[in-house]
Image (cartoon, rainbow, N blue to C red):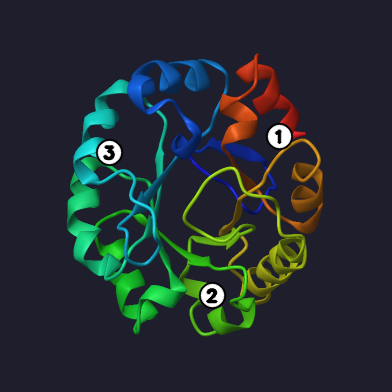
Amino acid sequence: MKIKGDDKMIQIAPSMLSADFSNLREDIRTIEEGGADLLHIDVMDGHFVPNLTFGAPVVKALRPHTKLPFDVHLMVENPGDYVEEYAKIGVEYFTFHWEAVPHAHRLIQAIKATGMKAGVSLNPSTPVSLLEDIAEDLDLILIMSVNPGFGGQSFIHNAVKKVKQARELLDSVGNTKAVVEVDGGINLETAPLVREAGATLLVAGSAVFGAEDRAMMIARLRG
């Protein structure tokens, strides 16, 4: 399934961080049938962020159970160490944190060489302007609208401005197909704000998995 940034299609990626860890297969089935576009998987190492979540073995085990593209967000130190492993699993997007690497351009090229799409994530306090030199090479910019590490946090409203800045930066270098993604505190109140600012991929955790009707929630978040 292709992700499009230039025609402003809004896509929804439910976050597995809010799923029932004892029942992942069933939760994935319900969101796939409910119209989800991707599966957002947060990989945390307990070092770059204080929490621990999924690792490559779990991601690999999930791959046969869904046709949804995997949107893997690595909140880890030394993300370059994992490129080949996730490429073999069959990941669509490999997104690393700008704050975790000294040579972002080199890592972007390594990711793309495997056939995966390269994304860069920015913590709430990291300015979009730091991406100017690599904007034309990116497939995705992920704006964190909460501090990374845990699900269920409140939305940081400065993220709306950063979404707009990210979209403008990508467009200014002719990279109109690149996606602006937002992760953190996305619900029926905040989704319209980031959509209007230029986000085309919305990560939603508790809003989707906590809904009685997940299909309806996905449709409403899409707008």
Residue 88 place in picture, x, y as percent: 18, 46
Residue that badge 3 annotates: 59
Amino acid carrying mark 3 in the image: Val
Q: Are marks 1 and 2 in contact (CB under 8 Å)?
A: no
The location of residue 164, given as percent across then percent down, is: 75, 65
Q: Is residue 94 left or right of residue 189?
A: left
Q: Residue at x 37, y 24 (%)?
A: 24
Which residue is more in the foreground, 107 or 75? 75
Mark 1 vs mark 2, CA separation in Å: 26 Å
Q: Which element carries disc 3, helix, strand or loop?
A: helix
Q: CA distance from mark 3 to mark 2?
A: 28 Å
Q: Nearer the viewer, mark 3 or mark 2?
A: 3
Left or right: 208, with 159 as reference point = left
Total numbered circles: 3
Position above or below: 194 against 170: above
| Neighbours of disc 2 within 10 Å: few (<14), some (14-19), many (20+) | many
Q: Give the residue at x 70% y 53%.
A: 155
**177 sits to left or right of 95:** right
The residue labelled by disc 2 is 135
Badge nearest the viewer, 1 or 2: 1
Three-letter code for the amino acid on which mark 1 is drawn: Arg
How dense is the environment of label 3, judged by Cα within 10 Å: few (below 14), some, or many (20 and up)? some
Residue 133 seen in this snapshot: yes
Which is nearer the eye, 108 or 13?
13
Q: Which mark is residue 222?
A: 1
Residue 69 image position (x, y, % from top left): 40, 37
